[in-house]
Image (cartoon, rainbow, N blue to C red):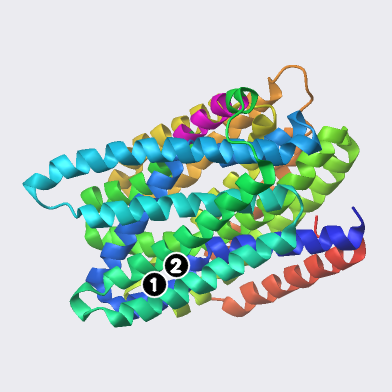
Amino acid sequence: MKLKNKNIVTILNIISTIILQGLAFFSGPIFSSVLGTGNYGIASVYLTWVQLASTVFSLQAAGTVAIARAYFTEDEQQKYQSSVLSLATLSYICFSLVTVLVVWILARTGGINIAMVVIGLIHGWGLYCVGFMNSKFTYEFKAHKNFLLSVVTSLLTISVSVVLIRAFPADTNYWGRILGQCSVYAVIGAAMYIYMLVSGRTFYKKEYWSFTLPIAIPTIFHLLANIVLNQSDKVMLQGLAGNSAAGIYSLACTFGTVLNTIWAAFNNSWVPFYYEYTKLGRVDEIKEHSRNYIELFTIVTMGFILLSREVFHIYADKSFWSGADLVPVFAVGYYFVFLYSFPVNYEFYNKKTRTIAAGTTFAAVCNIVLNIIFIKFMGIYGAVLATAVSHGLQFLFHYMCARRIAGTGFPFSFPQFIPGLTAVAVTCIFYQVTRELWPVRWGIGVLLGIYLLLKVIRRREIF
């Protein structure tokens, strides 16, 4: 791929991921003001269940699209994608029918809205199909299609939701948000599914399904454990320290996820090239580009920490400002997530998804145990520290596992990660020392930004 095209693909993939994953962050103020606290809460909880159904019921077959490129010929890719999307759809239908039956039985006792459950299941399938196509376009380096799909889906979801919200009475206008999301994802998802069937013309092939299931099923447990890892501290903090502490922590966590979204955008752009280089055995290029990647995200993390306090004060109400000092520790945790992606991407390429699930489960258990200990002695600060330490243990677990995969060479050494981790840790200490000296922190942040920009311009590549 020519250098210019490579940069365009990378930039578009980064923007596409930020648009999709940052949608909740950027649209939050719009819908919270229109819906109000109660109805916004209903719509948010609904979306949580939709995402859970989309994750579990689909068997996470989309996760195998990248790996299949290394094990099947280019001519088979469309057939494989068509077949595994049909497998995911068939699984989703079966799980959905069981869910509807259970809900119908339980609804006799009251308290369950069957209509919302059915709408949520349709929404979840559409959400999965759109995500599947995002994966397909990303790993086929069709960034322009990925960007177009992300922009159209996001704009339609917001605009249709706003129109429908205004069509419902104020006390039930959460239905506008729910139906707005469901209708857009259902229509686009169905179009994507039909497109894949027509392109691949393969509903079932034993070889493809046999390849998919052993890889995809453990990924479900990895994602579920990730939910426990990311949500357990909020629940435990509420029980151990009260609602106010949980609220401050949650908002600081939401703010901190901006850095995680940036990492996800970088990772979605890095992995396709990394897998392609791995497939071709170009280890030297992997090492060269990984050094650039580590430097890039390290400087972004340092800048995020240095500028976070004042930006958080703008983002949050004054009653939440005490949460600003949690953000740097969240940043350290997300930096560990960045580091652990190197061994995890390698494990995924080698189809070691059971190991990935085991590592995430291990980190989730550690987080629960550390929360019990740390929250008791340090309160809200204990919760964020427990999460950061758990992500650090998760990184160590996966690094040791990746080093033990037989038959291939893990191209990354532990000393390669130490300078970046040290720089981030020193930045956190510097933040504490200069909490009230914002011109100093912002000045260094600007210098880091200029340095990074010059490095990217000089090498003419993002990674």
Report x, y in % for residue 220. 47, 35
Report x, y in % for residue 268. 67, 51
Amino acid identity at mark 1 = Trp
For the stretch drawn in magenta, what is the main secondary structure? helix
Residue for point 59% across, 23% down: 210
User: Which residue is at the front of the view, 284 or 437?
Assistant: 284
Asked which secondary structure carries label 2, the reply is helix
**Residues under numbered marks 2 and 1 in contact, where contact means CB atoms less than 8 Å apart:** yes
Q: Which residues are magenta?
A: 211-221
Report x, y in % for residue 247. 30, 63
Which residue in the structure is indicated by mark 2? 324
User: Which residue is at the front of the view, 379 or 291?
Assistant: 291
Quadrant for residue 80, please give it. Answer: top right
Residue 214 painted magenta = yes
Residue 316 in sight from this viewpoint? no
Quadrant for residue 84, please give it. Answer: top right
